[in-house]
Amino acid sequence: MTPERLRQLADAWGADPRRWPEAERAAALRLLAHDTAARAQLARAVELDQLLDLHAVAAPDTALARRAQDAMRAPPRTPVRWWWPGLGAAGLGLAGAAAGALAMSIALAAVVPATRPAIAASGWSTSIFDTGTAADWSEE
């Protein structure tokens, strides 16, 4: 047992040796019997314990205790449904995005000239899958 370890024991467990860990208690008491500096450390720990023992927590006010008990007995409140306003905000956002996309497509259609023939003129399959003439495939 070292004086430093005795200080750690007194800081953690207080000055009363009965609260110290049993495995270190006998060695600490032997150190206290032979070392005056260790006894001085323990005397400071006793003073601190006495100061801490002076502190008392006041009992709560009876009105406060009654309100706390009444709050525990009260029926639970209905939960607020936060998803409903959030769903409305998301719907407005989607509607805004769709309206913006429509406005941009109309504005761009008026400004940018068409570079390809209309789909109705040649058929949807040839306009989507147009890779050249059929002869290209038959020659391979």
Image (cartoon, rainbow, N blue to C red):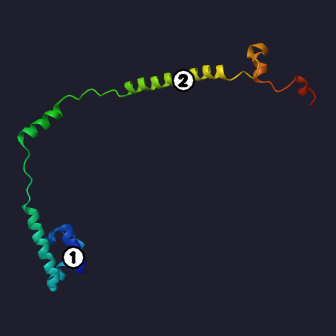
Q: Which mark is residue 100?
A: 2
Residue at screen point 21% across, 67% down? 12
| First of labels 1, 2 by sequence position | 1
Q: Position of residue 30 (x, y in %)?
A: 18, 82
Which of 63 and 38 lies nearest the eye of the viewer? 63
Left or right: residue 76 versus residue 133 is: left
Q: Amino acid at mark 2?
A: Gly
Q: Looking at the figure, which quarter contains the C terminus?
A: top right
SS category of the residue bearing label 1: helix
Q: Position of residue 102 (x, y in %)?
A: 57, 20
Which of 84 and 4 lies nearest the eye of the viewer? 84
Q: Which residue is mark 1?
A: 6
Does 49 sit above or below residue 111? below
Question: In the image, which is nearer the foreground, mark 1 or mark 2?
Answer: 2
Quarter residue 77 falls in = top left
Task: Name the outermost residue toward the right.
Answer: 139
Tell me the CA gap for discs 1 and 2.
Answer: 76 Å
